[in-house]
Amino acid sequence: MKRKDVARLAIGAGVAVASTAGAVVAGRVAARRHRSRFDPEAGEPFGLLPPDDLGPVVSFDGTPLAVRAAGPKDAPALVFSHGFTLDMTTWYYQWQTYADRYRCILFDHRAHGRSGAPADGDYSVQALGRDLQAVLGAAAPEGPVVLVGHSMGGMAIVSLAEQHPDLFRERVVGVALVDTAVSDLVREFFGASGVSLERVLRPLLQRITPEGAERIRSGLTRWGSDIPYLIALATNFGPDASPAQVEYVTQISSAASVEVWTQMLRSLVEMDLGDALEHVVCPALVIVGDRDLITPKTSALALRDRLPDARAVVISRAGHVAMMERHRVFNGLFGEFLEETLPAAAPRRRRA
């Protein structure tokens, strides 16, 4: 190699290192600046669990599921299904608000939160739907029920409809799908360029191993909590996000197992539940944040158009976890929906 080529290589390497170091420093400054903002949600006990422990509920393949509940045992049931790498505590604002007149049932999906991992390695969307069926059978075996799903949790609801459409004709009287898509996740996330990126990402997800995913995660966390915090802020929240909420979501997501980040993510990217939407014959409320980058407004509109009886609402300045970030607006919309679908159970509206 010629001397001038060596010099160029050294200069290029130095620029790359300096750029990376600069990005890390800038990230730390940005994260700390955001954390220092006034935060009306600071001090909220997001990790508080509903008081009634109904678990473990054993799913179809022996996977133990953590299930909790709050509210009158004889009241109509609301079953909350959480998103990818999260857990039941992301529904904190909802069960606190509605447990005075509904039976709020929350659970952790397989390999998430306090639930066990599948012994046979089944991380499919179909398994998520069957987990939801197991929770219904154990915690709400009879009476009307409203299903509420965020992101992956909404996919689990549609998967249940695909496998047990009779439930949506006989027992499920309402469905709320929050920041959810049911197919083409890569294309939804990357827009028009998703067609070409899909050809790259799908093989990459097929090849990546838990060990490789762990190395990536270790690389991100090696610089401290600032980089994961900024990633959560950029991908899950809007411009007015609560630092306490971002911090909490970062902690939960960072604790998810590498199998969730590899095998379950692969299942979600490869899924296509579009044809199953016809089985959700009950009234449906589709909610999306206008700053949601993961499942954007186009996803919500596609769901609304394919569901038999649905309406869509966009929450302004909200990202991918609208039920946390803009919980007052969300609870107002959801409360009205509940009064329509379960009118006898809603004699009064509690302040969010």
Image (tube, rainbow, N blue to C red):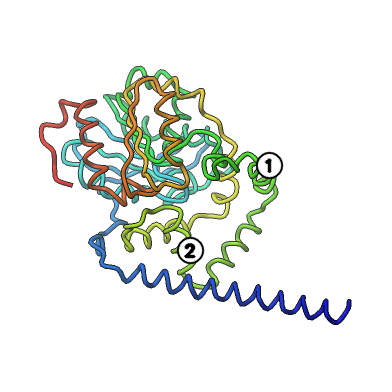
Which residue, as the protein is rendered here, is positioned at the far front?
4
In the rendered structure, the answer to whether residue 113 lies left or right of residue 283 reads: right
The secondary element bearing badge 1 is classed as: helix
**Residue at the (32%, 71%) spot, across then down:** 36
Q: Is residue 69 left or right of residue 255?
A: left
The residue drawn where x is 23% and y is 31% is 338
**Is 2 drawn above or below residue 171 in the view shown?**
below
- Circle 1 residue: 199
User: Looking at the picture, how far across and down is residue 23, in whole percent?
Assistant: 54, 71
Q: CA distance from mark 2 to mark 1?
A: 27 Å
Quarter of the image for residue 170 reads top left
Q: Residue at x 21, y 33 (%)?
A: 336
| Dot 1 crowding, Cα within 10 Å, few <14, some 14–19, many 20+ | few
Provide the residue designation for mark 2.
228
Task: State which tag comes first along the sequence, 2 or 1.
Answer: 1
Q: Amino acid at mark 2?
A: Pro
Q: How many marks?
A: 2
Residue 197 in the image: x percent, y percent? 64, 45
Relative vertical location of residue 146 with respect to residue 100 in this rendering, above or below: above
Instruction: Answer above or below: position of 5 versus 62.
Output: below
Q: Circle 2: is it few (<14), some (14-19), or many (20+) Cα within 10 Å?
A: many
Image position of 300 (left or right of 271) = left
187 and 123: which one is in front?
A: 187
**Dot 2: element:** helix
Q: Position of residue 286 (x, y in %)?
A: 35, 33
